[in-house]
Amino acid sequence: MRTLAPFFVFALAVGVLSPQLLGQSAPPVTLVKAARLLDPRTGNVLAPAAVLIEGDKIKQVGPASSITAPAGARVIDLGAATLLPGLIDGHTHLLLSVVIPPEEEQRRHLNSLFAPSDLMAIVESPTKRAFRGAQNGREYLESGITTVRILGHSGIDGDTELRDAINAGQVPGPRILAAGRKLITRGDYLQNLNPALADAILNQEFLFIDGADKARAAVRQNVFQNVDVIKVTANVNLTVPELAAAVEEAHRNHLKIAVHAAEKAAIQTAIDAGVDSIEHGNEATDEQLRQMRDKGIYFDLTPTFYGNLLLKITEPSIVLSPERRAARIESGTRRDKEYDQLVQRVIKSGVRFSAGTDMCWWYQGKTCGQVGVATLLNLRKAGMPSIDVIRAITINAAEMIGWQDKVGAVDPGKFADLVAVAGDPITDITELERVRFVMKGGQVVRNDFAAR
């Protein structure tokens, strides 16, 4: 034992040596200071505030007077700014860029409004789509959206590969939960395709549900692709047993299942099957909202077309007939009123809700991220209080996606994903359209305050 004593002394010394002496660099430390820090959970504001960051995680949050930067730490002073957690888009399609087809093309192709764009997404080169996804992801991040859930329309592996490239530091972008191919029934989306080629084309974008066994197999195929969530589209053809089988298989693999359901019947199918979130849900009844609340199903609101978005993105590049333009204005006004009522019923029901953009639209003169943030803020125009809108795209969205321990709030232990604006987003929520500071995982993405 006496001869072993020096060994133990050496081992103990090594155990307490600093990482630098062992050839390891200590994680960088950053102190971010701002006049205000908004906590979406409570609505309280900490003023003045400081956030101490070690590596990519938040270590300490508190009054600026109580937190001191250690020696060698980087200090970022944002002055009179308001800090918030990074924003979350719960429903997006970053590998799409839909351009509305001309009026006559829609009429002559005898298919749905967006079918030509969906078809182009399928037959385009996967490499081209990957570059578009990388661009859209960078624009999202620069606009303050630091986490997204991509729910289909990414080809076979576009979203999972973009996620992995971002995680590896190869391209900039938000944190991604990827769904892989969307599960659908025959008759959804594209129709009237050449029968000899239809399956080969559609299999690039979708996995078919044709009975409970096929539903399980489709989930397993996406599990093989290493997805983070399962996306299903529910329509009149989808049965409860089929969707329930997909839910069971997803949950067996510790994955949540998000279901596109806009009509009453589809919403009820999703509720009865026990899904984790219902996307869109435009025709949800008060009774269905109650069932969703009681079952803990999240309502992911997507105010995508609020304020006549279709008209705004069409007019700069396509001349509409007076009849079509008048019809769009009339339908848009009617749709906005219906959405105002839906938002109020959702708030009153007590159902848990978050928000997503359904973003895949090309808007001339704006980046994908700019349009994404503006779309999320449509909830305020629809009558939702500002603090509830902010909760929907931070703390609530984090819970919906199952990442409440990682993102959605400025808390110790969570990723250091922060945004800052010059004013007060509770008083004027459009401040979020003018984000001037973005940090993801302790790394500064943009800091317009530094240029003052």
Image: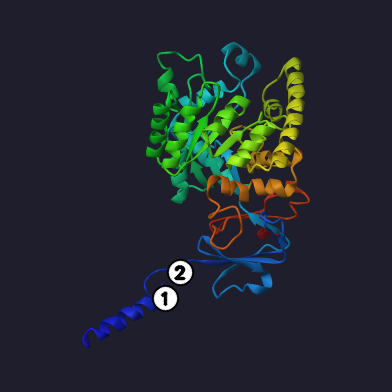
List the residue tagged with mark 2.
Answer: 26
**Residue 237 x, y percent position in the rendering:** 52, 21
In contact (CB < 8 Å): disc 1 and disc 2: yes
Residue 18, numbered circle: 1
Graded by Cα atoms within 10 Å as few (under 14), some (14 to 19) or many (20 or more), the crowding at tag 1 reads few
Query: Can residue 302 be seen by looking at this rendering?
Result: no
Give the Cα distance between marks 1 and 2.
8 Å
Instruction: Please tell me in which quadrant of the rendered image residue 344 appears.
Output: top right
**Residue 313 x, y percent position in the rendering:** 67, 29
Graded by Cα atoms within 10 Å as few (under 14), some (14 to 19) or many (20 or more), the crowding at tag 2 reads few
**SS for dot 1:** loop
Query: Can residue 341 be seen by looking at this rendering?
Result: yes
Count how many numbered circles sit on residues in the image: 2
In the depicted structure, whether residue 1 falls above or below residue 400: below
**The C terminus, quarter of image:** bottom right
**Residue 149 x, y percent position in the rendering:** 54, 42
Q: Amino acid at mark 2?
A: Ala
Residue in the picture at 31% in, 83% down: 9
Colour scheme employed for the rendering of this structure:
rainbow
In the picture provided, is 169 more to the left or to the right than 5?
A: right
Q: Amino acid at mark 1?
A: Ser
Which residue is at the front of the view, 359 or 239? Answer: 239
In the picture provided, is 351 more to the left or to the right than 154?
A: right
First of labels 1, 2 by sequence position? 1
**The N terminus, quarter of image:** bottom left
**Residue 400 x, y percent position in the rendering:** 57, 45
In the depicted structure, whether residue 260 falls above or below residue 13: above
Which residue is at the front of the view, 419 or 182? Answer: 182
View extreme (bottom): residue: 2
**SS for dot 2:** loop
Instruction: Please tell me in which quadrant of the rendered image residue 279 appears.
Output: top right
